[in-house]
Image (cartoon, grey):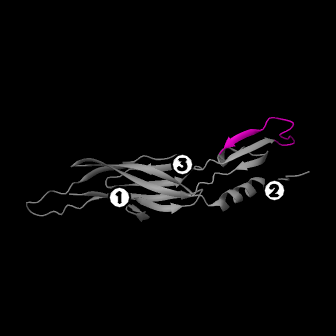
Amino acid sequence: MAISVEVSPGSGSVVTETERIGTINATITVSDDTESVPGGPTPVSFTSVSSTTHPGITMTPGTSSCTLVGTYEDSFTDQFKYVERGSSDLAGSPTTVVGLDNLPSNKMFYNLNQDTRNSVTKSYTVTATSSGGTNTFTVTHVINNEYESIRAAVAGYYEGVTTHV
């Protein structure tokens, strides 16, 4: 008897990769390869499958599978340094925040220290409960650091805003 996990979309326990501000819409299915034959071992019947999750992702449990759906919060640690509009780093104290989601609107940011990691891997611990006991599996999802995404985000931040006098 072997209990295994399969993800869709993806292969084995690896969800298909996504880009920087990525989404996940995956189904994780567990199965038992025991064949039902007279006098042989009895295949297990699953009663629940669930998973850990990450901010922005919703997990829906089931009896033989669970789903993970949502948009990841920014997984990269870009640092933005900004001042109030109409000020400068010489006239006031600059503020530094980590992550595009933490950069308030209507500020003048003048320094981006971009996270240059190629990717971040999110891990999920999947728990499958069955008549044979409890099994855990690790499922992974790679988020690639597509550098165009941060350029587009910066351009969008200033869209329609005058950045010079």
Q: Secondary structure at mark 2?
A: loop
Amino acid found under the numbered disc labelled 2: Gly
* Residue located 48% across and 59% down the image: 25
Q: Of the residues under marks 1 and 2, which one precedes in the sequence?
A: 1
Quadrant location of the N terminus in the rendered image: bottom left
**Disc sitting over residue 160 in the figure:** 2
Residue at 67% across / 51% down in the picture?
A: 114
| Magenta segment, prevailing SS (helix, strand or loop) | loop
| Disc assigned to residue 56 | 3
Which of pointers 3 and 2 lies earlier in the amino acid sequence? 3
Q: Residues within 10 Å of mark 2 (few under 14, many from 20)?
A: few
Q: CA distance from mark 3 to mark 1?
A: 21 Å
Asked which secondary structure carries label 1, the reply is: strand
**Residue 81 locus on image (x, y percent):** 74, 43
The picture places residue 90, in percent across and down from the top left corner, at 86, 38
| Bounds of the magenta segment | 84-98
Name the foreground residue: 130 vs 78.
78
The residue singled out by tag 1 in the image is 29
Mark on residue 66?
Answer: none
Residue located farthest toward the left when viewing the structure as drawn: 39
In the figure, is residue 4 to the left or right of 53?
Answer: left
Q: Is residue 149 above or below residue 61?
A: below
